[in-house]
Image: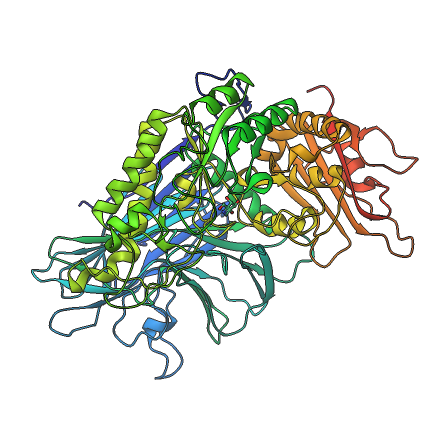
Amino acid sequence: MGITSFCNVTVSTFRRRVRWLTSAACALTIAVSWPATAQSTADIRYDQAARIFRLEAADVSYVLGVNQEGELQSLYWGKRLRPADPIPAAQMDKGTSSFELPVNVTPQEFVGWGSGLVVVPDVKITFPDGNRDLELRYVSHIIHNDTLSITMKDISRDVTVALLYQIDAATGILARSARIDNHTGAPLTVEQAFAATWNLPASSDYQLRYLTGRWAGEWNLQQGPLHPGKVVLESRRGSTGDEVNPWFAIERGNEPDQDTGNVWFGALGWSGSWQINIEQDWQHRVRVTGGYTPFDFAYRLAPGESLETPKFYGGYSATGIGGASRQLHRLEMDATVPQPHHLHPVLYNSWEATEFNVNEAGQEALAEKAASLGVERFVMDDGWFGERKDDHAGLGDWYVNPQKFPHGLKPLIDKVHALGMDFGLWVEPEMVNPDSELYRKHPDWVLNFAGRPRTEGRNQLVLNLARPDVRAYVYGFLDKLLTDNDIAFLKWDYNRNWAEPGWPAAPLDEQKEVYVKYVENLYGILAELRQKHPHVEIESCSGGGARVDLGILRYVDEVWPSDNTDPFDRLSIQNGFTYPYAPGLMMAWVTDSPNGMNNRSTSLEYRFLSSMQGSLGIGASLNKWTPEDFATAKKLVAEYKAVRETVQEGALYRLISPVASEYAATESVARDGHQAAVFAFLHSSQEGQPFPQLYLRGLDPEATYRLHLQTGQLADDAVERASGDYWMHHGVAVSLRGDFQAAFFTLEREGN
Ligand code: DGJ
């Protein structure tokens, strides 16, 4: 590995044309065309004299250096600096007392546990002779395109860590990971492996945001001041989980405004157990360390073996938390989900209408009704396979139930195609009901500790995907399903957490590797399926939003954020979701009223407008709808299609947060700025208070826009045509009164 002396690499990204290709049977094509704009570039430079690396893209500079001890030290992360701006070389911090060893107060990029480290180490290793001391020093680096790779090595033992830094040209978001290599002649055990540590500048005025939740109540935004000490965000569930999502944002100052202020943020690309530690010292310096949770973790590396961590993404926004979200949305849509990606079709899903009670005639009748609304994808949910009459049986037996579908799935799929839609199907590949042929044949295939109880959740157990035979079975049945049937979409569900994470068939000192190998095999299956069936799109669902992260997003096209489909609850759920994740990734169904979750009644318009802020779906019992309902829904589906590119791909501005407020409003601005779509919601009028004036954002101040009211009411004196400045500074007076009212309007730029 050679050392690059003075290196300057420029990488360009440019916008693409993407096209939605459907199965041969359907002739639907939706093209997303983004205009060419100034190209974004990423620069990575190394100044050999000062031993400083500068990674720069978009509005961000990230600077690190090698200090006199050979440690890798963070020097600057924030708004982009001028090329000639000086950055002093890295200098180890000596601390202020004997209780403050330099290793703890020097802001290190990646640090092994050893030499008195008391902050969270990035890596901790036990060697066979009992030594647990690891001190990593810079050895060499390589710069290649948008990637910097730095090799570090222990001061005496032949263990190296390769740190990877990639910077996204369009957003300046960095992706960091680490690979630990055992070059010694003996096995060692990695007990802790984080992807990276992010160091923030010192400030006593930081606000931390993160997301918590539970089934049917995901995406609650938590926000509060950061104090010296440690905050731990974590999942020990085997999967991402909905209790906390692996995302954080730290804002300097307490900006009441969404779109101003300095924000540092990060998200883990991992769908297994994880941990993010946010530590602040007495000098108010902040370090954020994330990766595999060390809880119950052990990974044995034989000589010559390596362990690679997931990616930990980190970004900086000078345009507040709103700007941070928009950067992440851009990264997800353009550089994370499988490319080229497509606009999501309007979808119908059978779950809330029929639950497990599916059959050929019933699904065909629903498909006819869905098609009449302009729906483009028909998805049959749970209940079509094995002896699946309810949630007690059938998982694992992936043959078509012959009583429900005597001629297989083909007649239904043909019918759906004849109606002009493509066909999607629900699966839950990683699970098994004890009441199934698969479990009776292979009781050893589930996660378990020998001789101990096997704790069920929803009457099911988790298959141990880390096992090669289980991996082969799961890939095999999915491949066959997609080969034998013209399926355009899989809803991939996952309805419980792990209980006994045992792998008795593996050698004793490798059993805990299940946490890593399970998820790697999950990703491997998804990647192979996508490769072999490139037209199949996949939705990640985990009883709602319990598996949404930047790892799974590399293999799926969209996610199901929550089983709670109440349109009012959804306003907060969707609001929280969009802090890290793009509205276009978020499937949102219009379902029945009163809602099954809380018996709340809302109008069909209100339900549609709530769902139209994401990827629109319909999950209602269409058999109960009146002709008026069909007419209303048809009109709203058409209106959605006219703004879907703006909503799914555009820039989101949160105008009024629904959290603890009677009001809510969002605005999406098209990438080329030709259109804005605005949705406004009123919970309940109180004492005749008018709906707050909506001050729009992200418009061209000079351009003229024409307002088109689609649903709801504006104030009597509302104008129709005005400048971007007018809409942003004079604003729009929406007239909403009563309970659960909503409005939707667009602005179209003139002279595009
Ligand atoms: C949980 C999902 O979140 C629901 O949408 C539905 O697919 C059910 N599972 C089916 O069992």
Any part of residue 49 in sight: no
x then y, percent, for residue 316 = 51, 51
x then y, percent, for residue 705 = 76, 27
Is residue 679 left or right of 240 when viewed as pictured? right
Of 499 and 731, nearer the camera is: 499
Is residue 133 left or right of 41 when viewed as pictured? left
Is residue 58 left or right of 75 when viewed as pictured? right
Spot the residue most to the bottom.
Answer: 98
Residue 541 vertical position relative to residue 201 in the rendered view, above or below: above
Any part of residue 232 in sight: yes
Is residue 25 left or right of 225 when viewed as pictured? left
x then y, percent, for residue 197 = 38, 60
Residue 34 vertical position relative to residue 97 in the rendered view, above or below: above
Spot the residue most to the front.
Answer: 403
Residue 530 vertical position relative to residue 168 in the rendered view, above or below: above
Spot the residue most to the left.
Answer: 185
Point 75% across, 47% down: residue: 601
